[in-house]
Each structure stands twice: as C-alpha cells, then as structure tokens.
Amino acid sequence: MSYKNWSFFTVLLGCSLFVSCNRQVDPPAPYGPLPTEYQMTWQKMEYNMFVHFGPNTFTNVEWGNGKEDPKVFNPSAIDCRQWAAVAKAAGMKGIIITAKHHDGFCLWPSKYSTHTVRESSWKEGKGDLLRELSDACKEYGLKFGVYLSPWDQNHPAYGTTEYNQVFVNTLTEVLTNYGEVFEQWFDGANGEGHGGKKQVYDWPLFNATVYKYQPQAVIFSDVGPGCRWVGNEQGHVGETNWSRLDVEGYEPGAKGPNPDSLNTGNINGARWLPAETNTSIRPGWFYSPSTDDKVKSLGQLVDIYYTSVGRNSTLLLNVPPDRTGRIHPNDSIRLMELRKAIDESFKTNLAKGTLTATSTRGNDSRYSVTNLLDGDYDTYWATDDDVLTASVELTLDAETTFNRLLLQEYIPLGQRIVAFNVDYWDDATQNWKQLIEATTVGYKRILRFPEVTASRIRIHITRSLACPLLNNLELYNAPDYPLGISDDHRYNLTSREGWKLLSPTVGADKIIDGKADEAVLVNLSEPLILDLGKSQSLTGFYYAPQNKVTAANIQRYRVYTSADNKNWTELKTNGLFNNIRNNPVRQDVDFGQTIQARYFKLEPIELTNTEDSYAVLELGVIQE
Ligand code: FUL
C-alpha cells in the first residue's frame, strides 16, 4: 500500500471511530400495545381504597333487592373525613365509592331515581354522600373514583331500552358534579329487575359518556377499556401477569373472558389492559356486625400485597364503613398494621454495589445497566434489538442477607419480559445457585424467596418478546408475617357433637368435619340432610362453597327443618347466596327466628354453573 493510500485509510478509520464513539443509538421502538399517559398515572398509584356503603350496610345482605325501605339508610355519625384520613394514613392514593349498587340506591340525590339518600332518614333527606366524600378526598390529597352498577333492581325502566339513557343520566350527574374522577368502576353483573326483566347494556354509550366528561378516567370492567378484573375477589392476580388482553367478542360480566385469562392476561393480547386486584378486608363487601371479628389478619393482607402489587397489579382494598358511617376500629387498626409492615419490609434497599450486564444497547451509556439503581423512573437499561436473552449482575459492596427482589420493567414502551431466573453466587462451592425462576415483570414485580446471604446476585432473562428494558432493581430483607387465624380455623368454633350427615352418604364426614380443606362433589339430585342427634334451638345455617370462581357451587336453594326426618317445614323457598360466584366464601344465613328442630335440609335449585353436581366444603347449623 502506498503512503498516499495508507494515509487515506487512516483518515477513514479515524472518522469511523469518531462516528462510532459518538453514535447515538436509536431508542428501542415501542413494542405491542402501550399504556396511555392516564393508565401510567393510574398504575403508579398502586394502592387504593374501595368503599361499599349503602342500605346493605344496615341489613346484613350483600345484594339488596331494590325493595328495601330507603329509610334503613341512616348512619348516625357519618364522617367521610375519617375515611379519607384512614386511607391517607394507610398509604392509599384514592378512594372508589359504590355510588349505586345493585339495589339501585343512589348515595346522591339523583333526579332520575326515587331510591336515594333524599328518601332516606339520613340528614332528613338533605344529605349528599358523594359531595362529602369528594370534598374529603380533595382535603386529604386523595383521588376520587366511582362505582356505578348498571344492574338496578329498583328503577322501573330497568329491562327496557329506555333504561340505558336513564343510566347515562345518572352517570352524567356523578361525573359532572363532584370534580375529577380517576377511575370509573363498572360492575358487569346483569341480573333481573322489575318483572323479572334483564337489561341489554349499551357499553359503548356508557364508556363514551365517561370519556366525554372525564377523559382521564380509567374505566374498570372485565374488558376495560382502562383496566381489568383479575377473575377473583380473593386478592390474587396470576404469577404470570400480562398487562394485555384480547377483548374482541367479549363484554363485561357473564360474557367476559374466562377467569384464567383475566387472571394472567394474554401474552400477545391486543389491548393494553392492566390488572386491578379488588378484594375486601372482610369476608363480604358490605359491613355487618357479624364480621367484626373476621377482618383479615395482618399476614393475609401482607400476602395480598405481594400477590397484587408484587405481581404487576394495583390493589383496590375494600374497607366498608359501619352503621355509624365510620370505619370500624378493627379495620382501621389492621390497615395501620399493614402500612407499618409494608414500611418495615421496604425500608432499607440493600441493592448497593456495582452493576454489569452481558449486553448494553449500542454500548451507549444512556442505556447503561447503572440506570437500574439511579431512582429515576424514566431511565432504563436496554439491549440491542436482536438481543433477547441477557443477564444483569450486581456485585454488592458487602455480603448481604436478603429475601426479596423488586424489579420494574419500563412499560411505557410495552411489556416484554416473558421469563427469567434469579441466581446468587455461592462462595462455598464457587458456583451460581438458583434462587427462583419467575415469569413476567411488568410495572412492578416483587419476588419472595427464603433468606440468603451472598455478595453477588444475577438476573438472567431467558425469554423476552423484544429487547428487555428494566428501570429499577431493589433488594430487601423483609420480616415474615404469619397468616394467622383464617376463616378456616373459625369453623372449628362450632360444636358439631352428635351430628351425622344422612345425605349424601359418600364424603359425608368431610362435609361436617369442621375443616374447610377439601371440597366434596354431590349429585344435584341429592340434598344435604343433617341429623343433629337431638332437638336443638337453631337460628341459622352456614354453607362453605369451594373457593374457586369456576367451581359448581350452590347459588339458589331451599331450606327445611324437621323434628322426625319425615315432616319438613320449608323456611326459605328461593334463597340466594348473594355474589357467591365471584366471592365464594362461607355463607352464614340467619333464619330471622329461632327454630326447634333435630333435622336440617339444604336443597340446591341452581348452581353457579351448568354442571350436574355441586361442591360443598362445609355445612352446619348455627345454634342459639
Ligand atoms: C361484584 C358485586 O356483585 C359485589 O356485590 C361487589 O360490589 C363486587 C366488588 O363486585 O360484582
């Protein structure tokens, strides 16, 4: 090569080096459906309060039928500022109130209904609960959201095409009179109203009404469009949880996607539809004095935090005010304990050290793995477009003991990571050892594993739909909070001495053993007949269904008692276990009188699905 050529090459090489050192690699392209700005704001709220309040608070039922006297609604010392103070101290960011439940009762004096606070005894009909709560939320810096049930058992127009407009009118009142609404909660339940008629809901019209007056509101339902139900009311979204769902051909309610899809989302789902885990601090959604001693234990609530917020979901925890109109101390104390437990668990981030990655996008410092520790939500680590598996390693400044790993994926550009492993470096064997294998990260993922002491930890992404983007990594050593007394243990408190189940004969022992552990399947033709051994004073009965949304549990039933197992007295002709499909917890039914009897019979007349046998976990009578 001549000197002239050589110098030409030097110049060329120099230029290309110059260009590559300063090259700004393109940011990763968005992948799949993306969250809107409003969905991002909503996702970051993480933890909100649900409030079920209305006539049911006073009548011991979960579903009112619209025929209740509005005068039963009469809280003696309502204090929405107390609700807001409790929510705020609990660490919640917003409150969603049941403005109208299935009984049609409106917590504001609606022009379009005659079943409202105006007709109640509260404040001599001059009260407006939405006003009081929305004001309290503003005062405490909380966001305000509304639940409105299209199913309305009171309104005379329900079941006619006219009703959809009535519903839109009530919706408009709620959305235009109380300031900003961060979430609109639509219940898909579609039961019978006046004269046994069901309504064909106009969902596109309902959604358009929300967006017209509150464009930033995130709309909840089985199919969104803002966020989705997780397919159960027990407080857990899937370990695999995609913030995406296919909604084509589905509707909110019974025509919704199956509970498993709702629980995990769909890996290639066409719509961005993040999960909201909704559950109640008590067994039911509405207050009842009978559940004052059944508030979930601290351990149960901590567990729910991990199975919701820790799995890429928000948590909407229901705290039902009592008959005075205040949050009962049993609930508020538990919420403060939960707040303390969360604070304690995530007080000290132990992820201090040096981060390296097997690959960095364009070797560009803007996508450096060090972004994972900088506390800035909008800086993230990324790989090149064609690098779909990669590892991130953290060498800790010192040997550290930890049992929790928190990861966040940069979801404004889509959810991508399918599967990953977490390993720690074992000094004794000089090898990597696996701590845990996991699927999906999403907005926030908190992994729990047994305590380990190590100085290196590695996150190995084994499958990603597009180049992975992570923006945060934290390590903690959190205390364990034992689950404590659960409802299952409480069954043991009932004395079952001398009881014998005469029907069915197979599995009878399990049904009355006081252990709500194993469900027995009974043929629909066989009722449950219990012999108490001798005549007793009975005030009610309980039925514990199988704890699964997809189970075949009893929904409608007849109940009888007898002194001789021959002549039966019918106590309930068409009993309904309210909301048992979505919330399959133990049902306690009060006879409303004391009955002297030796035999008790429960006859199923309708199940939660179309199977021909039904599930029973436990059955028993409640004695005086
Ligand atoms: C369900 C309703 O039927 C329950 O009563 C409760 O409001 C729950 C949050 O949603 O669909």
Image (tube, rainbow, N blue to C red):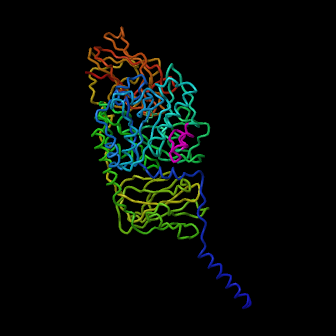
How many labels, in total?
Answer: 0
In the rendered view, tell whether residue 548 sits above or below residue 497.
below
View quadrant of ligand 1 = top left
Residue at 50% x, 45% y is 217
Which of 569 and 282 lies nearest the eye of the viewer?
Answer: 282
Residue 117 falls in image quadrant: top left
Which of 27 and 403 lies nearest the eye of the viewer?
Answer: 27
Farthest top residue in view: 567
Residue 623, image x and y in percent? 27, 21
Residue 216 counted in the magenta span: yes
Residue 413, image x and y in percent? 56, 56
Residue at 42% x, 22% y is 67
Residue 144, image x and y in percent? 42, 44
Residue 166, image x and y in percent? 52, 30
Residue 81 counted in the magenta span: no
In the rendered view, tell whether residue 534 sits above or below residue 219.
above
Name the quadrant of the C terminus: top left
Residue 248 falls in image quadrant: top right
In the rendered view, tell whether residue 495 sits above or below residue 279.
above
Which of 170 and 547 lies nearest the eye of the viewer?
Answer: 170
In the rendered view, tell whether residue 606 sits above or below residue 392.
above
Farthest bottom residue in view: 3
Name the quadrant of the N terminus: bottom right
Residue at 34% x, 48% y is 90
Residue 546 falls in image quadrant: top left
Residue range (magenta): 206-225
Q: Is residue 52 left or right of residue 534?
A: right
